[in-house]
Image (cartoon, helix red, strand yellow):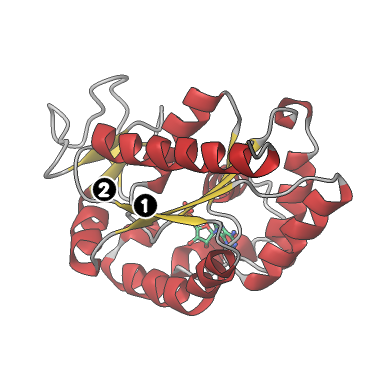
């Protein structure tokens, strides 16, 4: 099963991606996480990667496409994969089609999480991450017991550079200029399910699973008409 999860920054796509990957036993491939890890470990191809990310701009297509190409051919992708944060441009979408096409594969589901802009800004501003174990908190919705300290491992919490006010705005701009056309592209192929991203994590997850199962039934009916 090959799934893409899309949604603007702060829509909760990373959280939902983990749940989907767990339910369907497929690896979650999150380009943002891979890039942050690479930059943190001094591994990223070119120091400029960090600069793009801090500014809220997209890392060049060739860098990200190279990462995905290496990743989707790994052994644990035999049952499929869940792409989180890729593709974000039409060129990335074309490259993905080429990679899958070579192997006779196609995208099965595109999930797009929808949320109002003001709500997204509120969410991003309060988001905090543990510098040691990566656990996520929110100053309003899920605060740690002790300010600035992770409940799980005692690590210190930090705010992602790209969650700061100025950068949030440019991430939205990038999203609407470069990534929304990708959603339209997949929508024109009838692949996208639009999911209301407001509500409890479990409720949103339920909506997503319903959409996936619904589409699976539809695909089955088309391949085995009665
Ligand atoms: P995310 O964690 O998905 O919000 O991604 C964080 C940052 O990583 C983005 O703002 C970009 O700078 C970079 N990034 C992640 N995925 C991509 C991608 N598919 N194409 C280009 N840049 C990306």
| Residue depicted at 73% across the width and 40% down the height | 71
Label 1 Cα neighbours within 10 Å, binned few <14 / some 14-19 / many ≥20: some
Q: Is residue 62 left or right of residue 112?
A: right
**Residue 156 location in percent, x, y?**
29, 34
Q: Is residue 74 left or right of residue 44?
A: right
Q: Is residue 12 left or right of residue 85?
A: left
| Residue depicted at 58% across the width and 64% down the height | 186
**Residue 95 makes an appearance in the image:** yes
As drawn, which residue projects farthest toward the right? 102
Cα–Cα gap, marks 1 and 2 = 8 Å
**Residue 205 location in percent, x, y?**
34, 36
Q: Are marks 1 and 2 in contact (CB under 8 Å)?
A: yes
Q: Is residue 37 left or right of residue 18?
A: right
| Residue depicted at 24% across the width and 68% down the height | 117
- The image shows residue 220, relative to residue 123, as above or below, that is above
Q: Quadrant of the C terminus?
A: top right
* SS class, disc 1: loop
- Quadrant for residue 94, please give it: bottom right
**Residue 101 location in percent, x, y?**
82, 53
| Residue depicted at 52% across the width and 66% down the height | 187
- The image shows residue 159, relative to residue 210, as above or below, that is below
Q: Under 8 Å from ligand 1: the CB of mark 2?
A: no
**Labels 1 and 2: the sequence-earlier one:** 2
Mark nearest the camera among 1 and 2 is 2
Q: Which residue is mark 2?
A: 127
As drawn, which residue projects farthest toward the front? 226
Nearer to us in this view, 89 or 208 = 208
């Amino acid at each position: 099963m090959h799934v893409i999860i899309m949604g603007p920054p702060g829509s909760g796509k990373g959280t939902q991606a983990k749940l989907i990957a767990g339910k369907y036993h497929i690896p979650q491939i999150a380009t943002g996480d891979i890039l942050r890890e690479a930059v943190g470990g001094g591994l990223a191809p070119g120091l400029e990667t960090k600069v793009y990310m801090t500014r809220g701009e997209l890392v060049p297509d060739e860098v990200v496409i190279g990462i995905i190409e290496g990743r989707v051919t790994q052994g644990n992708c035999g049952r499929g994969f869940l792409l989180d944060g890729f593709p974000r441009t039409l060129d990335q979408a074309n490259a993905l089609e080429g990679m899958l096409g070579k192997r006779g594969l196609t995208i099965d589901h595109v999930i797009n999480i929808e949320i109002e802009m003001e709500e997204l800004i509120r969410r991003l501003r309060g988001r905090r991450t543990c510098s040691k174990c990566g656990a996520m908190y929110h100053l309003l919705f899920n605060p740690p017991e002790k300010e600035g300290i992770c409940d799980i491992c005692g690590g210190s919490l930090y705010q992602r550079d790209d969650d700061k006010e100025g950068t949030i705005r440019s991430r939205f701009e990038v999203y609407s200029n470069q990534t929304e056309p990708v959603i339209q592209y997949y929508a024109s192929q009838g692949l996208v399910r639009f999911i209301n991203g407001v509500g409890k994590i479990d409720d949103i997850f339920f909506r997503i699973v319903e959409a996936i199962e619904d589409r699976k039934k539809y695909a089955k009916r088309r391949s085995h008409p009665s």
